[in-house]
């Protein structure tokens, strides 16, 4: 498998630190509100990465954090008159609801920053002891000049960072690019005891402490959106490698931006949407299908038309699956004939091309093309006389590939009792060659929202779209 490494800026052969095991740290949400549609893209993409690695036989440990202490949380908790912990608890619960709706499986571990204060303090102290951090008025700063490789991920040169250019400027810092590891307590804010006085952790140090606590000094993969590349991920490298002396991450993966109607998402433009907003209008699986329609590093444009296209594609998948399930019921037993064996080989070729696309830096767009080739093969090759083994093989492959993508999660629905009763009456009418009654029952079923098709394998009734 080849992965594009943001640090080397090229595709590299994926070789994990420990054979057979992959450790992934994926940046999670700051839990002061519902997560927005832009956040949904990396959450979905790296859920697929985990599923695919498991499909390839790896044991995967996925760590996705919750940032449950920061300025935004403190401000909103104050506005609502509740504690920061109460706010975090509420929106962590809401995260699980929206992520679950989108088919995002829970991580192996979801660490909270506030539950890892001892690990954070120990890491900060380690940096102070090595001369890579310093305390000033109760705040501890990382000394960026102490890490010669600072900027190797983003390409930023520490000497070129002007005061105020995407870094905090404070009088007690030695240099503009230095950043806070531990922040001195301010009135009314949550605080924890430390060797430097009461305070709270800085944002960057949280992720280093939590990721290494669960995955060791060197992570296989660290993922997140491109907006986190600098300064967040750059600072993670500096403080982690500064403390341990070991490479922090083997492969950095960053997804491209999501635009809304060809514009950058922004509250000022009125095009800022939470996932909860989107799910009031669109089916969650349609949104997931859309997110996988482009290779993860490419920019992606969210619009009504794009969601409608995703919905149509998803409908094709469900229709193909339901057709196969229908034909399977009356399919003949026995060894597949020559045509059936050719169909099985075609399906296997599609799966091989799916794997090749996913092995090429998780190219879900190309993989989706191979998946729809399975659909095309099924639609053109499977009929009432196709052997049961051939149909079952196609279903197995279809389920296997869509499970990697987190699609086709809805089970075939049983017909309501009243619909099934009419369907049974129509079967009997056709046996009696009572065509008038058969047509009348078809019309009645149509009016109830169901389409009726008479096939060589029998009567087929499905809910109309």
Image (cartoon, rainbow, N blue to C red):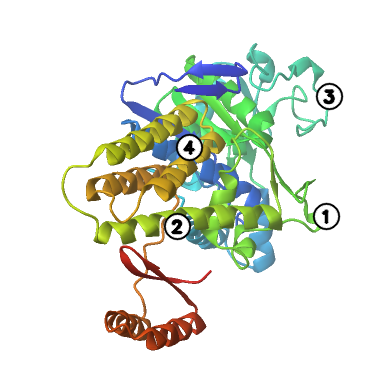
Q: Nearer the viewer, residue 221 or 239?
A: 221
Badge 4 marks a residue whose secondary structure is helix
Task: Report the mark closest to the observer, 3 or 1.
Answer: 1
Q: Nearer the viewer, residue 409 or 91?
A: 409
Residue 85: x percent and y percent? Answer: 53, 58
Image: 10 above or below 456: above
Residue designated by label 1:
269
Asked if residue 203 can be seen in this view, the reply is yes
Task: Report the mark closest to the observer, 4 or 3.
Answer: 4
Residue 160: x percent and y percent? Answer: 81, 18
Badge 2 marks a residue whose secondary structure is helix
Residue 234: x percent and y percent? Answer: 63, 25
Residue designated by label 2:
318
Residue designated by label 3:
162
Residue in the picture at 48% in, 47% down: 112
- Which badge, 1 or 2, is on the more N-terminal residue? 1
Q: Is residue 238 left or right of residue 455?
A: right
Task: Report the mark closest to the observer, 1 or 4.
Answer: 4
The span from disc 1 to disc 4 (Cα, nearest Å) is 38 Å
| Label 2 crowd bin: few (<14), some (14–19), many (20+), radius 10 Å | some
Q: Quadrant of residue 269?
A: bottom right
The span from disc 1 to disc 2 (Cα, nearest Å) is 37 Å
Q: Quadrant of the N terminus?
A: top left
Circles 1, 4 touching at the beta carbon (< 8 Å): no
Circles 1, 2 touching at the beta carbon (< 8 Å): no
Asked if residue 139 can be seen in this view, the reply is no
């Amino acid at each position: 498998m080849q992965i594009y490494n943001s640090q080397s800026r090229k595709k590299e052969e994926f070789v994990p630190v420990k054979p057979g095991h992959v450790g992934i740290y994926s940046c999670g949400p700051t839990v002061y509100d519902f997560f927005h549609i832009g956040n949904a893209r990396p959450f979905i993409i790296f859920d697929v990465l985990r599923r695919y690695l498991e499909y390839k036989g790896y044991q995967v440990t996925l760590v996705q954090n919750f940032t449950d202490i920061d300025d935004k949380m403190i401000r909103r908790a104050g506005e609502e008159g509740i504690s920061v912990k109460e706010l975090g608890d509420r929106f962590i619960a809401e995260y699980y609801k929206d992520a679950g709706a989108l088919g995002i499986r829970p991580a192996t571990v979801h660490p909270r920053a506030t539950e890892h204060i001892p690990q954070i303090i120990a890491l900060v102290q380690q940096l102070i002891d090595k001369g890579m951090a310093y305390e000033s008025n109760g705040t501890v700063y990382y000394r960026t000049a102490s890490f010669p490789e600072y900027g190797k991920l983003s390409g930023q040169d520490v000497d070129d960072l002007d005061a105020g250019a995407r870094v905090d400027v404070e009088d007690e810092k030695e240099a503009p690019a230095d950043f806070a590891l531990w922040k001195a307590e301010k009135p009314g804010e949550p605080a924890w005891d430390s060797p430097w006085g009461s305070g709270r952790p800085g944002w960057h140090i949280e992720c280093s402490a939590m990721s290494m606590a669960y995955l060791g000094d060197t992570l296989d993969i660290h993922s997140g959106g491109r907006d986190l590349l600098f300064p967040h991920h750059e600072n993670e490298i500096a403080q982690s490698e500064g403390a341990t002396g070991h490479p922090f991450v083997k492969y950095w993966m960053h997804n491209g931006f999501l635009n809304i109607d060809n514009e950058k998402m922004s509250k000022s433009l009125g095009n800022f949407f939470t996932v909860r907003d989107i799910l009031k209008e669109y089916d969650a699986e349609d949104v997931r299908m859309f997110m996988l329609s482009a290779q993860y590093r490419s920019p992606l444009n969210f619009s009504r038309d794009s969601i409608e296209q995703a919905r149509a594609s998803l409908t094709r998948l469900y229709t193909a699956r339901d057709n196969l399930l229908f034909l399977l019921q009356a399919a003949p037993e026995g060894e597949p004939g020559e045509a059936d064996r050719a169909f099985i080989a075609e399906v296997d070729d599609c799966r091989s091309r799916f794997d090749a696309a996913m092995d090429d830096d998780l190219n879900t767009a190309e993989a989706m093309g191979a998946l729809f080739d399975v659909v095309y093969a099924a639609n053109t090759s499977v009929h009432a006389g196709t052997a049961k083994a051939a149909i079952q093989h196609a279903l197995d492959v279809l389920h296997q590939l869509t499970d990697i993508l987190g699609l086709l999660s809805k089970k075939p629905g049983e017909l309501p009792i009243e619909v099934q009763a009419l369907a049974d009456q129509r079967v009997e009418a056709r046996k009696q060659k009572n065509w008038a009654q058969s047509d009348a029952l078809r019309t009645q079923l149509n009016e109830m929202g169901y389409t009726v098709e008479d096939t060589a394998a029998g009567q087929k009734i499905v809910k109309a779209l």
